[in-house]
Amino acid sequence: MLDAFYGAFSPACLALLGLWIVAVQMRADEVRASPDLSRRTYAVALFFALPGLMSVIALIDTGNPLFWRVSFAVIALVGAAVLFPVHGLPGGARVRNVADVVALLLYLAIAALAMVGGADVQRTVAVLLTALIFVGFNVAWLFLFTPLPPARPAGTERPPTAPVTEQQLTRG
């Protein structure tokens, strides 16, 4: 197994996940105001979390190829299932759509190859995981620099109501 690769790759993925959480926090109002954007930011978090999780799992039992193969296949299918319904970030639609398709194909390829197994396949899966992180980084970059619709201030979802007068309170 590629112990040295996964030993370095997992902390890199989890560090990117931490940076992503900080980036989302910088735009928390916009993210909270949009269910679509909330789903997208979660999907981008999985670009970093799932490869990081796969990397940690790859190090658990390096002598048992079936363990990593099944784990990688399940995690990659979860990634594909979560990514599939996400429609992307506002703006940059062409790049975003290409990134979504590429990521979906990468997750499916990782799942398929993990079930095949073998030393050459392990190297190929490592390359595909690296490509997935690269795609995730680019989608995250778009998020940071794409103008988003302004978030409404909290409590403005409902139309304003007239204030309650003292007379209305004492009539009860």
Image (cartoon, rainbow, N blue to C red):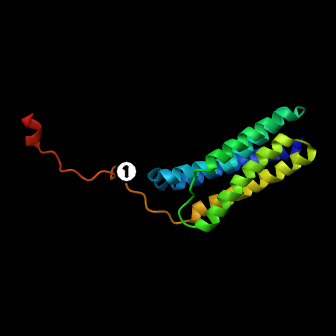
Q: Is residue 89 left or right of residue 109?
A: left
Picture quadrant of residue 89 = bottom right
Q: Callout 1: helix, strand or loop?
A: loop
Q: Is residue 152 left or right of residue 28?
A: left
Image coords of residue 5 (percent x, y): 85, 47
Looking at the rendering, in which quadrant would you find the C terminus? top left
Image coords of residue 75 (percent x, y): 72, 40
Picture quadrant of residue 105 = bottom right
**Residue appearing at x 51%, y 66% in the figure:** 147
* Crowd rating for badge 1 (residues with CA inside 10 Å; few <14, some 14–19, many 20+): few
What amino acid does circle 1 point to? Ala
Q: Nearer the viewer, residue 111 or 55?
A: 111
**Residue appearing at x 7%, y 42% in the figure:** 167
Q: Nearer the viewer, residue 50 or 112?
A: 112
**Residue appearing at x 18%, y 50% in the figure:** 162
Q: Is residue 2 left or right of residue 171?
A: right
Residue to which mark 1 is pinned: 154
Looking at the rendering, in which quadrant would you find the N terminus? top right
Image coords of residue 103 (percent x, y): 70, 55
Image coords of residue 56 (percent x, y): 77, 38
